[in-house]
Amino acid sequence: MSQDFYGKRKWVKTRKHHHCWGCGGSIPPGENAHYHSGVYEGEFGAFYMHAECYEDWQDNCQAGDDIGYGDIDACQAVRDRITAYIKSLNANSGDVQ
């Protein structure tokens, strides 16, 4: 399924305790966080992310990546495994059997 629409996407200073969607960690009151809201598969949802997690998500994840709660490192981890596999194939391509 797909994102129906995004509502707000903005930087906020939290007024109460939240959990980071990216890593699942705590975001205490008064900390800067990135806030997202919108409708997904017909249901309204909103979440907060640490600044570091949001930047990691922007740098390493692409549209269509299936990222769940606490999975912010999933995009980069998959890309790292693929890169290592391709490098191993390239390193072995010169071997003649």
Image (cartoon, rainbow, N blue to C red):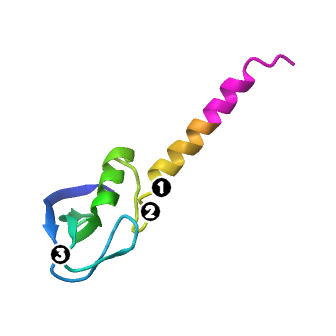
Residue at coordinates 59% horizontally, 44% vertically from top-left? 81
Residue shown at the point (52%, 50%) measured from the top left: 77
In the picture, the disc for residue 74 is 1
For label 3, the residue is: 14
At which x and y percent is residue 5? 17, 57
- In space, the residues marked 1 and 2 are separated at their CA atoms by 5 Å
Q: What residue sits 42% from the left and 67% below the top?
A: 70
80 vs 96, left or right, is left
Circle 3 crowding by C-alpha within 10 Å: few under 14, some 14–19, many from 20: some
| Residue 44 image-quadrant placement | bottom left
Dot 1 or dot 3: first in sequence order is: 3
What amino acid does circle 3 point to?
Thr
Q: Nearer the viewer, residue 55 or 88?
A: 55
Q: Distance between the residues labelled 1 and 3?
A: 26 Å
Relative placement, left or right, of 13 versus 79 is left
**Residue 29 falls in image quadrant:** bottom left
Against 9, residue 24 (above or below) is: below
Instruction: Check whether the beta carbons of the residues at disc 1 and disc 3 lie within 8 A of each other.
Output: no
Report the amino acid beneath label 1. Answer: Ala
- Contact? badges 1 and 2 (CB < 8 Å): yes
Residue, disc 2: 71
Label 3 residue SS:
loop
Which part of the image, by quadrant, shows the N terminus? Answer: bottom left
Segment colored magenta: 85-97
Report the number of discs.
3
Tell me which label, 2 or 3, sits earlier in the chain. 3
Residue at x 32% of width, y 58% of height: 52
